[in-house]
Amino acid sequence: MTRSLELVSVVPQDLGRVLLNLCSNALYAVRQRQQHAEACYAPAVTLSTRRTAERAIEIRVRDNGTGMSEHVQEKIFQPFFSTKPSGEGTGLGLSLSHDIVTKGHGGTLTVHSREGEGTEFLITLPA
């Protein structure tokens, strides 16, 4: 069943950059896992939205890629921290994404990940 969410006031270009960054990272993670996985691995990246009981908007970007350790998750939103090899990432994407969501939109950006299983980023925006 498909339902529409009410409109939420955001800066579309900024939120678009955040979603592009999260999806790009998710695609990178599933590609990395695919290169080293067994033949039955089926890469998956999903994006979903919902309105919470508190009327906030949640946007989830989930993948079944390589995942991250707890140590990496603790640093993931720090400027210049990158999980990618040198030359493949700037280390600014998730830091800037976090600032756009939290400072620019008054929301939250959190991560939950299990190494070898995948990652989920959750954006929560006030309505």
Image: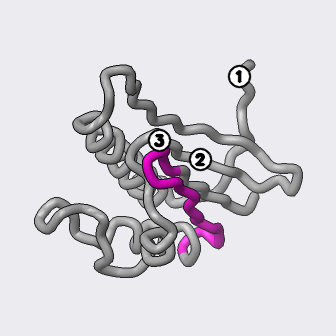
Side of 92 where 77 appears, left or right: right
Question: Left or right: where does residue 46 sit relative to residue 80?
Answer: right
In the image, what residue occupies the spot 27% across and 44% down? 32
Picture residue at 42% right of the left edge, 70% below the top: 72
Name the mark on residue 2. Answer: 1
Percent across and percent down for residue 31 are 28, 38
Residue 63 numbered mark, or none:
3
Q: Is residue 57 magenta?
A: no
73 vs 78, nearest the viewer: 73
Near mark 2 (Cα within 10 A), the count class, few <14, some 14-19 or many ≥20, is many
Q: Amino acid at mark 1?
A: Thr
- Asked whether 29 or 101 is in front, the reply is 29
Q: Nearer the viewer, mark 3 or mark 1?
A: 3
Residue identified by numbered label 2: 60
Q: Residue furthest front?
A: 38
Instruction: Look at 35% across and 81% down and name the residue there.
Output: 79
Q: Which residues are magenta?
A: 104-119
Q: Residues within 10 Å of mark 3 (few under 14, many from 20)?
A: many
Q: Position of residue 105 (x, y in %)?
A: 59, 68
Left/right of residue 23 with respect to residue 108 in the rendered view: left
Task: Give the Cα distance between marks 2 and 3.
Answer: 10 Å
